[in-house]
Structure formats: C-alpha cells, structure tokens
Image (tube, rainbow, N blue to C red):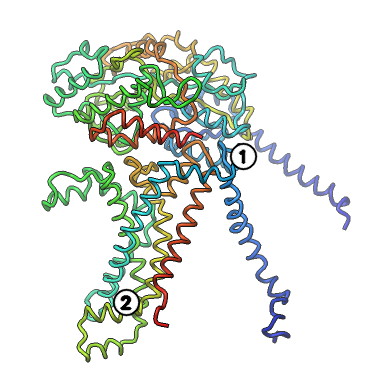
Amino acid sequence: MALAHRGGIGRYYNINGWLFVAPALGLIALFMIYPILWSLWMSFQSGRGMMLKFAGFANIVRLWNDPVFIKALTNTMTYFVVQVPIMILLALILASLLNNPRLVGRGFFRTAIFLPCVTSLVAYSVLFKGMFALDGIVNSTLEAVGIIASPIPWLTHPFWAKVLVIIAITWRWTGYNMIFYLAAMQNIDKSIYEVARIDGVPAWARFTHITIPLLKPVILFTTVISTIGTIQLFDEVYNLTEGKGGPSNATLTLSLYIYNLTFRFMPNFGYAATVSYVIVVLVALLASLQFFAARERDR
Amino acid sequence: MDMRTYLPRFAAIALAGASLLAVTSAQAKEITVWCWDPNFNVAIMKEAGARYTKSHPDVTFNIVDFAKADVEQKLQTGLSSGTADALPDIVLIEDYGAQKYLQSFPGAFAPLSGTVDYSGFAPYKVELMTLNGQVYGMPFDSGVTGLYYRKDYLEQAGFKPEDMQDLTWDRFIEIGQQVEAKTGKKMMGLDPTDAGLVRIIMQSAGQWYFDKEGNTNITGNAALKAALETVGKIMSANIYKPAAGWSDWVGTFTSGDVATVITGVWITGTVKAQPDQSGKWGVAPIPALSIDGATHASNLGGSSWYVLESSAEKAEAIEFLNAVYAKDVDFYQTILQDRGAVGSLLAARGGAAYGEADAFFGGEKVWQNFSDWLAKVPSVNYGIFTNEADTAVTAQLPALSQGTPVDEVLKAIDAEVSAQVQ
C-alpha cells in the first residue's frame, strides 16, 4: 500500500504511524521519563523515609560538606582514571594480536578472553572474593612462586582493595571491548596494510598509524561506554565488601553510596537522588569531553 | 453505554471473588516471618510457631531465613516502595534500627499497646519500641554480653577460670599475648569492618554515639575514646585473627582457632553447635575499662518482633506473638536452654532453666550469670543513626591500627557522622 503523502510535513501527521509507536512511547514516558523527572524533583527534597519536605538547594550544599560523598567521588574518579585507559589499551593490544590470521588457536583465545563478559557480575565478584582472601589461591600462588613473602591483604587494606576492584573489572570487561575492536579491524581493508608493508612500514608503526586512526570511532564509543560503566560501578564493590565499600570507605563508589543512603542508612531519598544526579552530570561532562578530544581536526 | 446496568453484575463477580479468597484464607492462615540466624531466632520462631499451631491447627508458619543485612535492606526497600505485597507479616528488627523504621515509615507497623501487657517486660526494651506514646512490636531477646573462653587453651597458657573473672582490658591483652606464646592460638577473632566490639566497650561504660537527647556525642565521649584505644591496643598487640565478614568471624571460633569470643549471649546457640567442643568453654563477664562509670556488663544487638500494619494476617500475627512471647514462660525456658536466648519477659527469669547448670560449659550456671549481668547493663539511647556512626567508626579503624592518635580519629569520626546526621 503506497502512502498518500510520502515525505514532507504530511509524514508527521500520519495518524497510523503515531498509533504504531504510541504504546512504546507511552511505556517509555511512564517508565523512563516520568521517573527521571520525579527523581529530579526529589533531589530538591529532604527528610527521613517517607517524611520528605521541599528543601531547595540544601542537598547540593550538603554534598560539599559531606566527607563520605567526597571520598566516594574521589574513589570513582580514581577507578575511572586508572582503569579505563588500562582496559582500553589492553583490549586494543589483545584484539590486534588475535586479528593475526597466522595465530594458532585464535578461536580458543578469543572465546577465552570474551568469556568473563558473559559471567554474572555477582558470581564473579563472589569468586574473586574467595580467590583473593588472605589464605586464598592468589596469595598462596604468589607465595609459592616467590613473588611475595607475606600474603597481600587484598580485602582488608585500603590500597589493595582498590587494586582488587580494578583487577576484577578489568578482567570482566576487557574481552567485551576487545570484541568491538576485532570487529572493526576486520572491516579495515587489507590492501592498506599491504601497501604499508611494501613501503617498508614496520609493524608497530602500522598499528599506531593505520589501525588506531581507523578504529577511532570505535575507540571513542568504547571509551564512552566504559566511562559510563565505571562511574556507575556498583555490583563488584557491593559483593566484594559486603555492601560496605570498606575497608575505610576505600572502595566506596557513588552508586554504592546512593544505595547506602537509601537502603542501609536512615533513608533519605532526596539526598540520594541528588547524588545520582551528580553521576548524570559527570557522565555527560566526561562523554562530551571525549567527543571533543576525538573530533575531526583536519576538516 | 450505561454503566449502571453493568455495575451490579461487576459487583457480584467482585464479591464472589472476594468471598472465595476469604474462604480460602479462613481455611489456612499462613504467617510469614523474616528473621536471620538459623541457630537462633529462626530456630526459636520455628519453636514458637510449633507451639501455636498445636492450639491453632489452621495457622501455618513460613519462616524465611535471610542474612541480617538483607532482612533490613529488603524491609527498607519494601517500605519505601509504598506497596506492601512483598513484605512479611512479622519481621525481626534489631534494637539499634527500631526507631529508624518507626520514625521514617509512620503507619507501617501495627501498634500493640492495647493488646500486649508491656509491664511484664524489661522497661529498656519497651522504651526502644515506643513512639509518641504508642508501643510497637513484641520485645524479644537481650544481647547481654559475655566473655566466652576456651578453658583448654587458657589452661595450657597457665590460666584458671578464676583468672578470667572481672578482667581489665589491659590484663585481657596480656593474657592474649601469653596464650599466643604458649599455644600459638590467637586470643580472639576481629572483623575490621564491624564496629561491634567498639560498641560493646563503649556501652559498658554507659555511653553511646548519641546522648540522651539524641545529639551526637563523639569528640567528648570518654567511653568511645577508651573503646577505640582498647581496640587499637588489641590490633597493635596483634592478638587477633582478622576476619572478613560475619561468617568468617564465626569461623574463627567454631574452627577452634581462637581462645575467646566477646559478644552477645545470642551467640551461645552457635557456640554450642560444635558438640566436639562440649566442656571446653567457660563464660566470664567481659573485661572493663579503667574510666569512671566502667562496668563488666554491656549489650550487643538484641532484637524484637514487629507486625506489619498492611499484613493480611495482622490480627492472627498479633494474637500469636501475644500468646507465645508475652505469656508462655515455659517457652522461654526451652529457648534459653536450647538456644541461649535471654528473653526480656521478666516472668521468665523465675523459671527453672535459669538456675540450671549447663554441661556444655562444664556445669557452670551460665544463665544465672547472664541474667545477673543483664540487670547491670548501663542504659543508653541508641538514637536513629547507629548505622551511620558505625560506618564512620569502621572507616577509621585502619588509621587507628596504623597508630593515628585517638583524638584525631575521633575528630574524623565526628566530621563524618555530623555530615550524615540530618
């Protein structure tokens, strides 16, 4: 059936089209837009449990004077600054190694590195907690090999607990990013590499001058996705530290703090909503910064 | 379309549906209960349920066993959501958190003032569950504390049970060092993310994170300062086995790795769950601080049962709690001997079980002792922000163990608590 008014303004007035998308739009409005607006309204309220009162900007003032929030923010930024570059670089290197057609057992390695990504967040966190216990398999292996003399207090020392969280999320997400790079690399025309090889460009230069520039849109995409993921980090820390973000708040993230404000402490939904808007602002800022850094400069 | 012609028909169908539901519920009433310790309150609730079902065969019980943190968080989530479908009929709440729930979710819990005779219970317990003149909840156990010690390990180290009575904390640490030197066992298990020990020591000297009016009481709190100093000394003397989390901590003594346990009387069921350790344990009063107002008695935890206002079986649940927990003295004797539950029903203290010797503890009259210590527990106001203060204290424990001066630690705790309390 041909449409009477193809294109033009008439398209926007086609009632049938609107009817088709109406259920989806209605559900999105009800379950996405309404809660987002409501949480914005909530962030201007404060109080205990259900006894919320309008508080203006009191919650935002409270943010500045809240050492726990500052700590959670610093931790989250530390994870982001340390973990995202390590993971992106690692994923790039692994992808380019596994893209080599002469590598034996390529399929096996690809699967092995991607596999962590399909495990449940909770399951692997619990597993990591066991493996990195004081007398767990990691410490006993490191001791047996002779790298360390006494067991590392992975879960009870503020520094090592952070390291453990970074190891855990890197293990979980590197394979995920690698798959994007692999897919993108296979789209790069082989003739470009051929020309480079004929011109005598060494392998390293081929990687930095051909692969990386051609992967730029994908690298940007994965960086933004990883940034959002790291800033919303919750499951791993919750399960590794029994929901406390310990030791000494050293692993507390913004999301975990929101959870504690809502479900563990005297419930203050208004303040928790304010902290969640900090995440929104942070993600928006960082993502636009990354888009800005990766913009096309030549044109 | 005229709705009026259809209304009666709708009403009839709705009524039929409702009466069908009513019939089914009259035939079998199920009371759902949330609680958290399979060796303790879960087992006790099963015993209470069994007693009630004998006289009320139509009532069955669904006792759900979670971790304590999960019970609290699930309850808080359910109450915040405003819908009660996922909530149980009866929930166990630890005393530290009771006022928080009562004040933040008004109308969520059923007042029992008219039904239950509260004059029969320990007054401090009733006070914890009173808000605006109404009393909510059924008082349950007390968390009176004791020093559980392995007689065999201490004997190897040269200490008799007499040497364990009425210690000071300094003496306790000295003994710990000798126990380790002679037996290779650590004195106690300690979870650096749990402020329980700090709370025990602090309350033993009659103070809390908050004063009687509920204002924060941190920097000028001599008992908290002394408690932190003591925990710092225990850490620097290295007489403890570190534990990560509750089950790990329980494992330190069930496995026989440590010589003592300092905690609430409710741990008795877990201690006694190791039959091969029968006769090897003794119980003494906890060590005391050397400051004004210091005692050998304190409290850790303790909890009470609350009925949800929205519960479909509210009346039956209240009737059940009143029949067993407020009246059945024999029930309290059973749970005392089987589980170590020191209830807060005063009449139960006169029962035979309290005077009996316990073979597991080498024939000591442990219950009489706990009952005596309970009378000496200094009364404090738990306020509504204990979770926040606890988090602030645990955040500073690593700094404390690395030798940061206690006054600085107190200032840091105060800063964190003040920002949270509002």
Instruction: From the image, state whether disc 2 or disc 1 is nearer to you.
Output: 1
Relative vertical location of residue A247 with respect to residue A292 in this rendering, above or below: above
Residue drawn at (12%, 53%) of the image: A145
Chain letter for mark 1: A
Foreground residue among A209 and A61:
A61
Q: Position of residue B406 (x, y in %)?
A: 29, 28
Relative vertical location of residue A212 with respect to residue B224 in this rendering, above or below: below
Q: Position of residue B188 (x, y in %)?
A: 24, 27
Q: Is residue B246 visible?
A: no
Q: Which residue is mark 1?
A: A53
Residue drawn at (52%, 31%) of the image: B100
User: Number of marks in the image?
Assistant: 2
Residue at mark 2 to residue at mark 1: CA–CA distance: 53 Å
Q: Which residue is mark 2?
A: A212
Q: Position of residue B72 (x, y in %)?
A: 48, 36
Residue drawn at (54%, 15%) of the image: B327
Q: Quadrant of the C terminus of chain A?
A: bottom left
* Quadrant housing residue B14: top right
Kind of residue at badge 2 = Ile
Q: Position of residue B149 (x, y in %)?
A: 25, 20
